[in-house]
Image (cartoon, grey):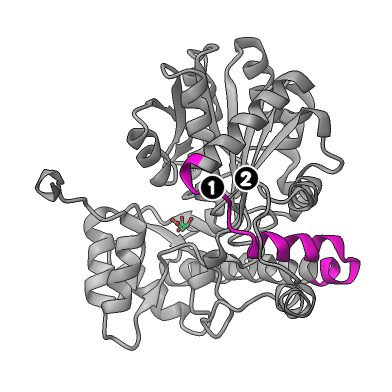
């Protein structure tokens, strides 16, 4: 039977993570997978999460099943964080194994609704987006998003490409902290896109995995909140991996906005059924921790404070790297690093330059030259900057 299988090429992010672990050099630098790192290089459990875990250990009386769509308290707490008071009578939910689980379930829901639809992806995007779409046999197209020459969103090109969408199209948007470019849409741009989606009847699918890493949870949700307040339908995939540091607990939420209660109920039935088909009940441990943190005023305050520390650290690392690169290169061409947001930026290196940095200097980044800002070694930035310039950047 297994003779019918073909070999799979490794996912480029996960493959790099494995290559880094296997590299024996002690001065190697991991700028690959999107995992937050403290100054000592570790990815700690967040303080409020640790305290919630202690409390959960004391108080939890059962490990029996939750609902197929996950716990209603988790839905309310997370959608409340994202949307303020959410439009409850129009939202259906599925708790999922991480943000990836939410993306997968969203696309499966769409495939059920309309198998001939086409998903428009930003160029570039997170590589698992096209991979899941291809796996499900859906059609996809790319819209222009990032202009490497200006290191900014090319909004005119984006809107020119999206001029071709219609009611059988889905437009995937990154809610904030675009992965891999760090180049985000402004609120007026979100408003223009929303109006266009409303006119054409295309559906927005918003992937938000880095809420709070850009300008804070409220500011980061502005664009998608406008969509929810304006359009009849939308899908939102949220991850708690990064902003709650719950990576391996697999904590995510899919939210589906419907035009009315009757449609919401049908969507909810489909989401519960899709969870049942794929894994029955979603993981609950991380979801319960998030619910406790968000519902307890003291834990929530401490979580927000630590999230702010993490965001500020990434922003200051951006500034510090831009500054050493400016000094070493005697040019301002790396100034874009401070204008971008979140965990990632594209350095603009070619594939051979990325390979040379890995082979010669032990500096690991994704093949498109995406760097994880949180992985920058703050005490070793001049060495890093010289290596970038040596490689021809
Ligand atoms: C990333 O982009 O590095 C993260 O979202 C981790 C992953 O699963 O790819």
In the rendered picture of this protein, how many numbered marks are placed on residues? 2
Q: Considering only order in the chain, which callout, 1 or 2, is on the residue closer to the N terminus?
A: 2
Q: Which residue is mark 2?
A: 68
Mark number displayed over residue 74 = none
Q: At which x and y percent is residue 257?
A: 70, 29
Is residue 348 positioned above or below 221 on the image? Answer: below
Is ligand 1 less than 8 Å from the beta carbon at label 1? no
Residue 32 position, x and y percent, is 40, 65
Q: Answer above or below: position of 26 versus 4.
A: below
Q: Residue at x 74, y 67 (%)?
A: 308
Measured as percent of width and height from the top left, residue 93 is found at: 68, 39
- Residue 157 visible to an observer of this rendering: no
* Residue plotted at (39% across, 77% down): 29
Classed neighbour count for the residue bearing mark 2: other residues with Cα under 10 Å, few (<14), some (14–19), many (≥20): many
Please check the rendered image and state whether residue 239 is part of the magenta-colored stretch, yes or no.
no
Dividing the picture into quarters, in which one does residue 243 lie? bottom right
- Residue behind mark 1: 280
Q: Nearer the viewer, residue 289 or 226?
A: 289
Kind of element beneath mark 1? loop
Overall secondary structure of the magenta section? helix
Relative to the observer, which residue lies in front, 381 or 344? Answer: 344
Asked if the residues shown at circle 2 and circle 1 are in contact, with their CB atoms under 8 angstroms apart, the answer is yes
In three-dimensional space, the C-alpha distance between marks 2 and 1, rounded to whole angstroms, equals: 6 Å
In the rendered structure, which segment of residues is drawn in magenta? 277-302
Q: Is residue 165 above or below residue 296?
A: above
In the image, taking residue 152 as reference, residue 90 lies left or right, namely right
**Quarter of image, res 386:** bottom left
Residue at the farthest bottom position = 26
**Which of the 4 image quadrants contains residue 387?**
bottom left
Q: Secondary structure at mark 2?
A: loop
The x, y position of residue 47, in whole percent, is: 73, 78
């Amino acid at each position: 039977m297994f003779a019918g299988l073909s070999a799979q090429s490794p996912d480029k992010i996960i493959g790099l993570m494995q290559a880094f672990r296997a590299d024996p050099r002690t001065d190697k630098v991991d700028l690959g997978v999107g995992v937050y790192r403290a100054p000592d290089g570790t990815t700690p459990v967040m303080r409020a999460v640790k305290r919630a875990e202690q409390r959960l250990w004391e108080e939890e009386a059962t490990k029996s099943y939750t609902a197929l769509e996950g716990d209603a308290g988790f839905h309310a707490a997370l959608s409340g964080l994202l949307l303020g008071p959410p439009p409850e009578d129009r939202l259906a939910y599925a708790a999922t194994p991480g943000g990836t689980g939410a993306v997968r379930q969203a696309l499966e829901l769409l495939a059920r609704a309309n198998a001939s639809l086409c998903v428009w992806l930003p160029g570039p995007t997170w590589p698992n987006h096209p991979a899941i779409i291809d796996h499900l046999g859906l059609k996809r197209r790319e819209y222009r998003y990032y202009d490497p020459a200006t290191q900014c969103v090319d909004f005119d090109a984006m809107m020119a490409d999206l001029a071709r969408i219609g009611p059988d199209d889905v437009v995937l948007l990154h809610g904030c902290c675009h992965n891999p470019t760090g180049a985000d849409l402004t609120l007026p741009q979100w408003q223009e896109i929303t109006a266009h989606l409303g006119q054409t009847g295309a559906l927005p699918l918003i992937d938000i995995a880095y809420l709070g890493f850009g300008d804070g949870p409220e500011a980061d949700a502005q664009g998608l909140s406008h969509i929810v307040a304006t359009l009849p339908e939308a899908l939102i995939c949220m991850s708690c991996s990064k902003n709650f540091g719950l990576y391996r607990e697999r904590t995510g939420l899919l939210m589906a906005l419907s035009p009315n209660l009757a449609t919401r109920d049908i969507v909810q039935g489909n989401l519960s059924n899709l969870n049942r088909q794929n894994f029955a009940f979603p993981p609950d441990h991380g979801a319960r921790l998030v619910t406790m943190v968000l519902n307890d005023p003291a834990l929530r305050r401490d979580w927000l404070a630590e999230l702010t520390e993490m965001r500020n650290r990434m922003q200051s690392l951006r500034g510090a790297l831009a500054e050493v690169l400016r000094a070493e290169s005697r040019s301002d061409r790396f100034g874009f690093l401070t204008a971008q947001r979140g965990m990632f930026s594209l350095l603009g290196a070619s594939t051979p330059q990325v390979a040379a940095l890995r082979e010669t200097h032990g500096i690991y980044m994704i093949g498109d030259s995406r760097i994880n800002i949180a992985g920058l070694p703050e005490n070793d930035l001049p060495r890093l900057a010289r290596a970038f310039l040596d490689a021809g950047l």
